[in-house]
């Protein structure tokens, strides 16, 4: 005996138990009449109807600001800086003295020019006196010539031909003296005109030694210190004065937007800019980089004469009040132009899908099947998307949540959105 008797009994019982289990498993596996496939329920998606509202759509752009006036303060004469009368970055008034160039050399030139003018005037007086003397001499010579000619006519031979010739020669000499005096007067008149021009030039140069601000504004940093030589080709610019209230913002619009603006302008009898006659200027809004929305309001005051052929854009300038000088020249800003008020359909931004064919929305039909509708998008309005074109209607049920579980043709379980999608407050719509 290889194994004890208790081992044989235990083994027999184990085999019997395992046999019974195997029989039950086989019986259960072969009985498949009650194990049928049950499809999962349609996925739940949240839907909402488009909101129909009248909105003011806007077109948004980026632009740069530029000072309303900016003047380079130049030294118009060459000399040494005698004084600087401003502090860097200070506010200055119109005609305020900013700097002074040493005036002594220019005063000396002016004195010399005035002396030359006085000399020319004295020469004119001398020439006038000479003309008077020559006129008198000519009249005397003519009288003497008439006397000898009369004597010769009354008594032939009473006066010799030589004496008559001498008298005639004296008349011609006196006449030449008159012409010479007249030429001397003309010459002195020219000298006076030239001397007066030199005096005017010297006075201007002397006045240029005092440099004033032509506008009111804020002065920049001085480029030279007292004692520096200024006025040479490389040392003309002393500083800059800018006026930033109001302030300009320049930006470009596309040709399509430009045509739309023009059509609205014609329909409303409104001018393209405030400088054109007739109609009201178009309003515009501005926002800085750290600001929400567009808190600064202004008007378009200039539009370029033609489209830029290289870019297909149109240059536009807007003017904004800037009393606190918050907006600085050279800043990048956001520009928003409100359009006409019009009815529009609004949907949640999360409802919009995009593929190679463009933007689309998923809607649920009466059979709870998903359908795709192609749409054209406008701007944004109170964090909602404007639908500007397509087949969308206010009665459509648009999928706003669960888009990833929806596909065209699939059946879903739509659940109405509990919170209304219509914004509570009014606002303007922004362009895409």
Image (cartoon, grey):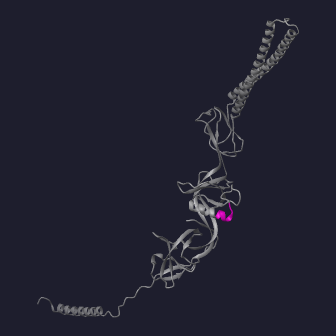
Residue at 26% from the left image edge and 92% from the top image edge: 26
Work out which residue is located at the far front of the displayed protein and give it.
156
- Residue 293 visible in the displayed image: no
Is 202 left or right of 257, judged from the image as shown?
Answer: right
Residue situated in front as seen by the camera: 251 or 326? 251
Whether the magenta-drawn stretch holds residue 65 is answered as: no
Which of the image's four quarters has the N terminus?
A: bottom left
Q: Which residue is drawn at 45% across and 75% down?
A: 404
- Nearer to me, 303 or 104: 303
Q: Quadrant of residue 38?
A: bottom left
Residue 315 location, quadrant: bottom right
Q: Residue furthest right?
A: 154
The part of the chain drawn in magenta is: 264-270
Q: Where is residue 363 in the image (x, y as percent from the top left)?
A: 51, 78
* Residue 268 covered by magenta stretch: yes
Foreground: 253 or 36? 253
What secondary structure characterizes most of the magenta part? helix
Q: Is residue 241 above or below residue 148?
A: below
């Amino acid at each position: 005996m290889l194994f004890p008797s208790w081992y044989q009994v235990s083994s027999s019982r184990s085999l019997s138990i395992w046999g019974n289990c195997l029989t039950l498993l086989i019986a259960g596996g072969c009985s498949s009449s009650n194990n049928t496939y049950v499809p999962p329920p349609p996925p739940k998606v949240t839907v909402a109807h488009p909101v129909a509202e009248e909105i003011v759509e806007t077109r948004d752009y980026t632009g740069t600001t530029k000072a309303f006036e900016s003047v380079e303060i130049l030294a118009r004469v060459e000399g040494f800086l005698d004084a600087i009368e401003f502090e860097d970055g200070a506010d200055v008034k119109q005609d305020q003295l900013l700097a002074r160039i040493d005036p002594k050399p220019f005063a000396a030139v002016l004195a010399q020019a005035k002396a030359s003018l006085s000399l020319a005037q004295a020469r004119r007086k001398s020439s006038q006196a000479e003309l008077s003397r020559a006129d008198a001499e000519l009249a005397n010579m003519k009288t003497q010539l008439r006397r000898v000619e009369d004597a010769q006519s009354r008594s032939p031979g009473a006066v010799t031909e030589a004496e008559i010739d001498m008298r005639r020669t004296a008349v011609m000499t006196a006449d030449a003296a008159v012409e010479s005096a007249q030429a001397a007067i003309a010459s002195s008149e020219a000298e006076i005109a030239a001397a007066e021009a030199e005096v005017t030039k010297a006075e201007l140069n002397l006045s240029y030694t005092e440099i004033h601000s032509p506008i009111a504004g804020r002065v920049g940093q001085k480029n030279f210190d007292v004692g520096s030589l200024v006025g040479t080709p490389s040392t003309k610019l002393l500083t800059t004065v800018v006026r930033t209230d109001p302030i300009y913002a320049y930006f470009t619009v596309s040709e399509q937007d430009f045509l739309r603006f023009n059509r609205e302008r014609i329909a409303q009898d409104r001018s393209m800019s405030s400088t054109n006659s007739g109609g009201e200027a178009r309003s515009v809004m501005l926002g800085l980089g750290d600001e929400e929305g567009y808190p600064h309001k202004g008007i378009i005051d200039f539009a370029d004469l033609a489209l830029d052929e290289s870019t297909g854009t149109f240059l536009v300038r807007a003017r904004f009040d800037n009393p606190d000088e918050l907006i600085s020249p050279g800043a990048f800003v956001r520009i928003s132009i409100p359009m006409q008020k019009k009815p529009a359909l609004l949907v949640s931004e999360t409802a919009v899908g995009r593929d190679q064919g463009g933007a689309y929305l998923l809607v649920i039909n009466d059979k709870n099947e998903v359908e795709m509708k192609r749409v054209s998008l406008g701007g944004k309005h109170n964090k909602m998307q404007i639908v500007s074109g397509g087949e969308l209607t206010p009665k459509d049920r648009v999928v706003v949540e669960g888009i990833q579980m929806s596909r065209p043709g699939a059946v879903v379980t739509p659940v109405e959105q509990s919170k209304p999608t219509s914004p509570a407050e009014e606002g303007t719509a922004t362009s895409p």
